[in-house]
Amino acid sequence: MILSLTDLSGESLQSQIARQIRAKVLAGELGADDALPSIRGLARDQHISVITVQRAYEALERDGLIHSRRGKGFFVSELSKETKKEMAKGRLAEKLAPQLKAAVAEGLSADDISDVLSSLMNDRKGN
Amino acid sequence: MILSLTDLSGESLQSQIARQIRAKVLAGELGADDALPSIRGLARDQHISVITVQRAYEALERDGLIHSRRGKGFFVSELSKETKKEMAKGRLAEKLAPQLKAAVAEGLSADDISDVLSSLMNDRKGN
DNA sequence: CATACTGTACACATACAGTATATACAGTCA
DNA sequence: TGACTGTATATACTGTATGTGTACAGTATG
């Protein structure tokens, strides 16, 4: 389990942890019943506080992506490929909606928005 | 100048003010040299603090959308239609980029992302 | 000139979120 | 038993957002 945390992004530590683990679970990089790092172990490795890791795991648990077993650790929950795709799509839709609303309010057309999306997706190919 | 502010959205007051005025300027609803409400007047009308309005106006001034004239008030800056469209597109791209990156990391394909966007744009037609 | 507007610039205070340290309790396993 | 694991709680520090209050400076008008 390799995480990359930074203080400089403006994103909170617990959000970075949750986001990176969520991506690994939804993309299938972590499978059902795979063990996550213990909250103490991850806190030690990343030189951060236990409570910060715990809150990140709580968020993932609320989303149904992982579950805890007292005394044993945290484990990836069993989710079908379809469920994971729907979760990822749902998350994207929730985050995109207010931004599209703002873009329309700022005078952009559906074509303008498509242009922006195409440019960004083409940019991503180079990475 | 009609603004709609709420405490319940999770978005800060100064961000709501800046976002709503930005939309009016970029969409052309407010034109060059139109006067904005005075910081004290807007604060009084909305029952919020002067400093909150001032910080919202500062953000818009940094973006080059408005400018102040000491003793007179704040006014919309002169911007070509093309400049405004580029500003709106640039803002959208900046906000979309990290979310597309996250969506790809969560296993979504370009087609999946297009699907989500199409659904959201179709939903918007009904509003 | 006096008054009432405008923006600008502080000093403080309050609330909350994020982060941290520390302690204690409970379950698991070699 | 000892060394792990998760769970829960108390306390504290920091930064951001928000607020009140005060003071100063430029503009407009009667």
Image (cartoon, coloured by chain):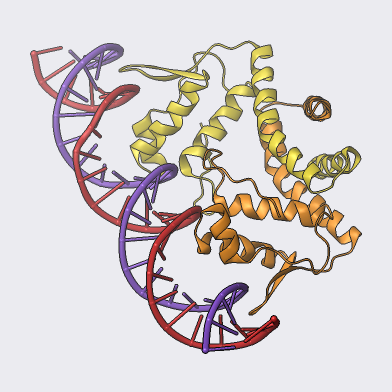
Chain colours: A orange, B yellow, C red, D purple
Picture quadrant of residue D22? top left
**Residue at horizontal 49 percent and vertical 52 percent from the top:** B7
Indicate the position of residue D1 as horizontal and vertical percent values. 52, 89
Left or right: residue B73 compared with residue A117 = left
Residue B47 showing in the rendered view: no
D3 w.r.t. A63: above or below: below
Q: In this view, does B33 lie to the left or right of C12?
A: right
Q: x, y (%) of residue D23?
A: 14, 29
Q: Name the one closer to the observer, B39 or A54.
A: A54
State which quarter of the image contains the C terminus of chain B. top right
Residue B123 seen: yes
- Residue found at x 55% / y 11%: B78
Relative to A44, D9 lies left or right: left
| Residue C1: quadrant of the picture | top left
Q: Which residue is nearer to you in this view: B97 or C15?
A: B97
Front position in the image: B12 or B108: B108
* A41 vs B24, nearest the viewer: A41
Residue visible at 80% across and 42% down in the picture = B104
Residue found 78% across the figure and 42% down from its top: B124
Say if A63 sits above or below B34 in the image: below
Q: How many marks overall?
A: 0
How far across and how far down the image is residue A23, in percent? 75, 51
Q: Position of residue B105 (x, y in %)?
A: 78, 45
